[in-house]
Amino acid sequence: MTAPRLRRPARPREEVLAVAMAAIAEHGLAKLTMAGLGKQVGMSAGHLLYYFGSKDQLLLETLRWSEEQLGERRRAELGRAGVSAWERFGAYAELYLADGPGDPRWILWVEVWGRSPASAELRAGQLEIEAPWQADLEALIEEGVAAGAFRGGPAAERAEQLRAVLDGYSVPLAIGLPGVDREQSLSRVRAVAAALLGVDEEISVDGETGVDGES
């Protein structure tokens, strides 16, 4: 009597997403295939499709997993005690902005954006993933206004504007547009934020300088 074949246990979902992210970082998104990813995690392409439904869904879930990891760092930075709202905005911008050419997180964002017009599911997932970035920045702006560090005004609108600026500087960085420099981009983001929030860019590290340079 032939012994029954033991079914290989499925790899944990998080492991598959981590391998997908690593593959994107090493080889780029264009070379990521379900078959190739399956070989790396010891699963068939069919099994991957069973778990994720489609490559679009795999990309969305990989992006969601990546953003969850970064979200932990963002919350830690924004929750630092004794650090001014302006300094914490600087930390937020550092985490948000693309690291440079080929940044796998931002390559995923660009790909998801490109596929979203044809998929209501991707559009809904994208909004869900973006929501914590928006909410955390709104809360930071409101806190800065309450402390007198930022000029009063609608937090949600200004958070949307600042995220649009960060998006605008991140895409050229991620795709490796010639002449684009991360430090210069970050400096320009801070200049826009200072104007929008009413902050003197010479604000002291200890937070003694107030809105528009008032002490």
Image (cartoon, rainbow, N blue to C red):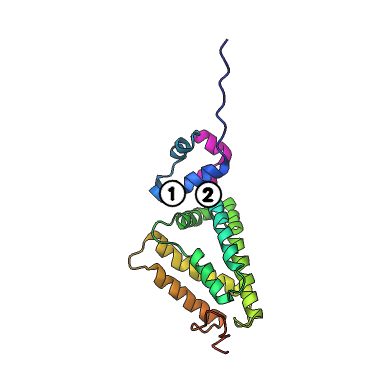
Q: Earlier in the sequence, mark 1 or mark 2?
A: 1
Q: Is residue 57 magenta?
A: yes
Q: Which mark is residue 164?
A: none
Residue bearing the label numbered 2: 62
Residue 58 seen anywhere in this rendered image of the structure: yes
The image quarter in which residue 100 lies: bottom left
Residue 7, position in %: x, y? 57, 26
- Residues under numbered marks 1 and 2 in contact, where contact means CB atoms less than 8 Å apart: yes
Q: Give the residues drawn in magenta, as a range.
A: 45-62
Residue bearing the label numbered 1: 24
Badge 2 crowding class, 10 Å Cα cut-off, few under 14, some 14 to 19, many 20 or more, is many
Residue 108, position in %: x, y? 48, 54
Q: Is residue 26 magenta?
A: no
Q: Residue at x 55, y 83 (%)?
A: 198
Q: Residue at x 44, y 75 (%)?
A: 188
Against 98, residue 11 (above or below) is: above
Residue 214, position in %: x, y? 57, 89
Residue placed most toward the observer, 11 or 31: 11
At label 2, the amino acid type is: Thr
Q: Residue at x 50, y 44 (%)?
A: 55
Residue placed most toward the observer, 163 or 20: 20
Residue sitting at the far bottom: 214
Is the N terminus in the top left, top right, bottom left or bottom right quadrant? Answer: top right
Is the C terminus in the top left, top right, bottom left or bottom right quadrant? Answer: bottom right
Residue placed most toward the observer, 211 or 173: 211
